[in-house]
Image: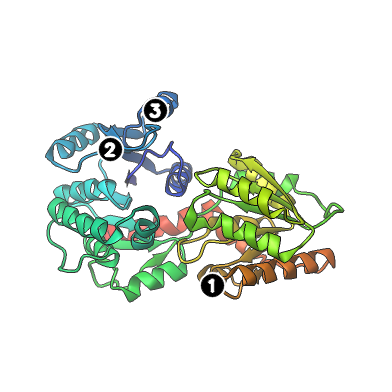
Amino acid sequence: MHVVMFGDQHVETLGGAQVSMRLQRRFLERAGHTVTIVAPRVHGPRGRSIAVDASYLDIPSIPITPDREYSMSWPGRRTDRWVDAALASRPVVDVVHVQADFWGAFIGHRFAARHGLPVVHTMHNRVDVGIAATTPFPKTVLRVLNGWQSWALGPHGKRRDGWAYLRGLAARSDAVTAPSAHFARRLEQHGVAPRDAVPRVDVVWNGIDDGLLAAALAEAPAERAPGPPRFVWLGRMSPEKRLLPFLEALAASDVAADVEVIGGGGQLRAAERLVARLRPRASVVFAGRMPYARTLERIAAADAVVQTSIGFETQGMTIFEAASLGTPAVVSDPDLAAELGSGFWPVASGTTAALADALRAAASDISAGTPVAVDPTIRDRFRQSSRTAAMVAIYERVVAR
């Protein structure tokens, strides 16, 4: 098959959806399929560093962030003509896979409608929660987005909230997928479902590269090294990830532990100041951003990964990466806990005190040599090869129909 993917951002930029799309492309090609990825052209230093790749169609765009890494392409007739011309010399397209929420989604759905092609739409994000966390006037933004969708794709209903926005995209899709069961069921509860007689949202986890997983497992220590409990927190340092509440809970817990914070973002300085002010008993090291393979090594060497966001994640990759490597987690989000099934210390509520209690419980169990055991089946279910096989089955279903 020839699969054409549409994204909001170029897959060589930073972001979970971009990482997932790169991985999907690699494993689809290994399985004998052809993949073309359509996304906005990148500007600035990042754009100049991207190697020429025949599988990338970089739409003319304008930069939308100060560092010029992220871009936007306007979904209109000029872009339609550009995409049609760029794909005309490529193999006949079998299926369109939209993995975007905004302009990339509009461009992809417009392309599929013009050419009568089946659409699989992967919902990576909770639009309502994401916009509420990143914009000062979320209701206004959502009304504008719904109006923009109606302009780009046609009317899709009267309500103007985040669920109405996602319903409009799903109604134009032959299959809708989500990266977790809890997000899929929430989509269904709000009427976000494909347009035909299949009412359910398909669950296809974002996976981990089989080779990187094998390499990380090979490098993982056979036995736990002596020392205090080792916790890892990793992710983007922004309010919805709740790094600062974690550091407050760490100080309140009074556990003697080694804590490594991996990642970067706007709250780094605030986090460093908070640690200096609270002076937790635990040692805290801000390790910065790391290559993915190195991050996996740090997860494998840790006693537990600490997950702190609540209601924001549609999958929660870090706890699945940890479970695949045999590392348990402290989990704040009850939806993610239910998805994981076992192998974690639950946080009873969103309070600092509850997180401190969970950290104390984890540290006590680790020190006693009795940490919770992860689900051994996650490793095979999380491999990208199995996720690609599941997605190909969906492609074949919509193409046959």
Q: Are marks 3 and 2 in contact (CB under 8 Å)?
A: no
Separation of disc 3 and disc 2 at Cα? 26 Å
Q: Closer to the observer: label 2 or label 1?
A: 1
Q: Quadrant of the C terminus?
A: bottom left
Q: What's the CA distance linking mark 1 and mark 3? A: 39 Å
Residue depicted at x 15% and y 50%: 152
Q: Which residue is mark 2?
A: 91
Q: Which residue position holds label 1? A: 334
Instruction: For label 3, count other residues whose C-alpha is less than 10 Å away and answer few (under 14), some (14-19) or many (20+).
Output: some
Q: Is residue 66 above or below residue 145?
A: above
Mark with earlier residue (2, 1): 2
- Residue 180 in the image: x percent, y percent? 46, 65
List the single residue furthest toward the right.
226
Q: Nearer the viewer, residue 108 or 117?
A: 108
- The coloring applied to the image is rainbow
Residue under the image location 33 percent in, 50 percent down: 100
**In-image side of 164 versus 318 (left or right):** left
Which residue is painted at 23% across and 67% down in the image? Answer: 195
> Which amino acid is tagged 1?
Pro
SS at mark 1 in the image: helix
Chain-order first, disc 3 or disc 2: 3
Q: Nearer the viewer, mark 3 or mark 2?
A: 3
Image location of residue 292, percent across then percent down: 59, 42
Quadrant of the rendered image containing residue 173: bottom left
Q: Earlier in the sequence, mark 1 or mark 3?
A: 3
Residue 72, compared with residue 255, is above or below; it is: above
Label 2 Cα crowd, 10 Å radius (few <14 / some 14-19 / many 20+): few
Q: Label 3 amino acid?
A: Gly
Cα gap from disc 2 to disc 1, whole angstroms: 45 Å
Check disc 3 and report the residue beneath it.
47
Q: Which of the 4 image quadrants contains residue 154?
A: bottom left
Query: Percent x, y for residue 330?
Result: 65, 65
